[in-house]
Image (cartoon, grey):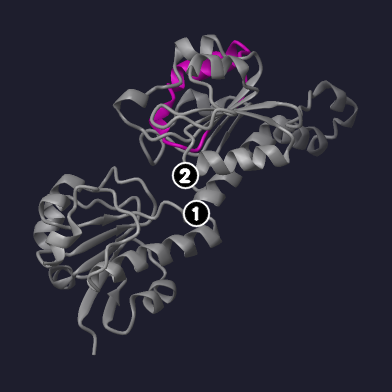
């Protein structure tokens, strides 16, 4: 017989998570207030808020599992104070996001939008007027050398690119390390962002940094929207310092329209690069496994609140 109730906050694939949670768990995809009141676990999508009000309405909650790594809408401090781990799934979307960054870079380097328009409009004779670039032999600058940044570096090697990396929190290996962000920007044909958004990284890409970027560089942001200053980015595009911008993340989300969006050398995706079919399956599995671990008295693989004390919580 089921002993635990676990609820979904946002759309979660029950067919994926139920086998992982096990037979002792009742999984509720569209919970009522009464079901939230008895829930011991929650699988939470990125756009759903878990604040003190929700925690008051879920007095039996023992674990929150966030599908992904961002916890912007989760009150981690309040959860920690109640002894609740906030499980995250850092590895599940790594490869998908890295592929997404390269998809944006290839789209802009190979000029797919203007070339599509050229063929569609019957302007074949103008094809030599569209400069098509190469990744082979180009320099990729990676800002943030965690799981995703490292995977981007692996893909860059397959494309024949030279890789440089800057990480404000953990230095990359010496063969890739570039200690100065401005130097990285000056040296990179493609600059891709994969660092967390904290106070020190907000508008990391700003007017000052873009003034020194390698002329014609491409900027990719699959990290967090607040890493770039959109006004400064648009100015760099209009001045020709940047030749293209690919954005999968925005500040805020859902995105509010900005004139940057209208520039012909900008490609936009709605924070979806880490949400491929395979990546979503993996993140649901990892989230459900984290819930199952906590309910069984085991420490989960990854949490956003390292101050949470597993032994104290299970005592």
The x and y percentages for residue 100 are 58, 44
Q: What label does residue 271 carry, if any?
A: 2
> Measured from the top left, where is residue 240 in percent x and y?
63, 13
**Going 56% across and 50% down the picture, which residue do you hit?**
95
Q: Residues within 10 Å of mark 1 (few under 14, many from 20)?
A: some
Q: Position of residue 57 (x, y in %)?
A: 11, 61
Q: Quadrant of the N terminus?
A: bottom left
Q: Are marks 2 and 1 in contact (CB under 8 Å)?
A: yes
Q: Residue furthest right?
A: 125
Residue 234 visible? The answer is: yes
Residue at the spot of label 1:
275
Please say whether residue 101 is visible from this viewpoint.
no
State which quarter of the image contains the C terminus.
bottom left
Q: CA distance from mark 2 to mark 1?
A: 8 Å
Task: Determine whether, in the image, residue 65 is placed left or right of residue 162.
Answer: left
Residue 278: horizontal and vertical position, in percent?
A: 55, 61
- Reply above or below: 264 against 212: below
Q: Is residue 292 left or right of residue 50?
A: right
In the displayed structure, 1 sits above or below 41; it is below
Element class at badge 2: loop
Queried whether the magenta region covers residue 5, the answer comes back as no
The part of the chain drawn in magenta is 221-244
* Residue that protrudes farthest toward the bottom in the picture: 1
Side of 301 relative to 106 (left or right): left
């Amino acid at each position: 017989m089921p002993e635990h109730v676990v609820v979904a906050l946002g759309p979660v694939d029950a067919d994926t998570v139920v086998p992982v949670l096990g037979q002792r768990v009742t999984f509720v995809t569209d919970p009522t207030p009464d079901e939230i009141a008895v829930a011991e676990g929650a699988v939470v999508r990125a756009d759903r808020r878990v604040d003190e009000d929700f925690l008051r309405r879920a007095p039996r909650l023992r674990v929150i599992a966030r599908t992904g790594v961002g916890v912007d809408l989760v009150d981690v401090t309040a959860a920690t104070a109640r002894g609740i781990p906030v499980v995250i799934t850092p590895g599940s979307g790594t490869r998908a996001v890295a592929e997404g960054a390269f998809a944006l870079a290839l789209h802009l380097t190979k000029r797919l939008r203007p070339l599509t328009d050229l063929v569609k409009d019957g302007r074949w004779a103008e094809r030599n007027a569209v400069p098509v670039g190469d990744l082979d032999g180009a320099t990729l600058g990676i800002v943030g050398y965690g799981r995703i940044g490292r995977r981007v570096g692996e893909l860059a090697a397959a494309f024949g690119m030279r890789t440089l990396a800057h990480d404000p929190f953990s230095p990359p290996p010496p063969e890739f390390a570039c200690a100065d962000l401005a130097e990285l920007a000056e040296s990179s044909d493609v600059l891709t962002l994969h660092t967390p958004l904290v106070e020190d990284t907000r508008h990391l890409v700003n007017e000052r940094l873009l003034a020194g970027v390698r002329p014609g560089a491409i900027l990719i942001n699959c990290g967090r929207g607040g890493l770039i200053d959109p006004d400064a980015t648009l100015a760099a595009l209009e001045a020709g310092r940047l030749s293209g911008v690919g954005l999968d993340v925005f500040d805020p989300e859902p995105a509010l329209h900005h004139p940057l969006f209208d520039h012909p050398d900008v490609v936009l995706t709605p924070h979806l690069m880490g949400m491929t079919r395979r990546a979503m399956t993996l993140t649901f599995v990892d989230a459900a496994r984290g819930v199952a671990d906590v309910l069984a008295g085991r420490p989960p693989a990854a949490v956003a609140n390292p101050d949470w004390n597993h032994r104290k919580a299970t005592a």
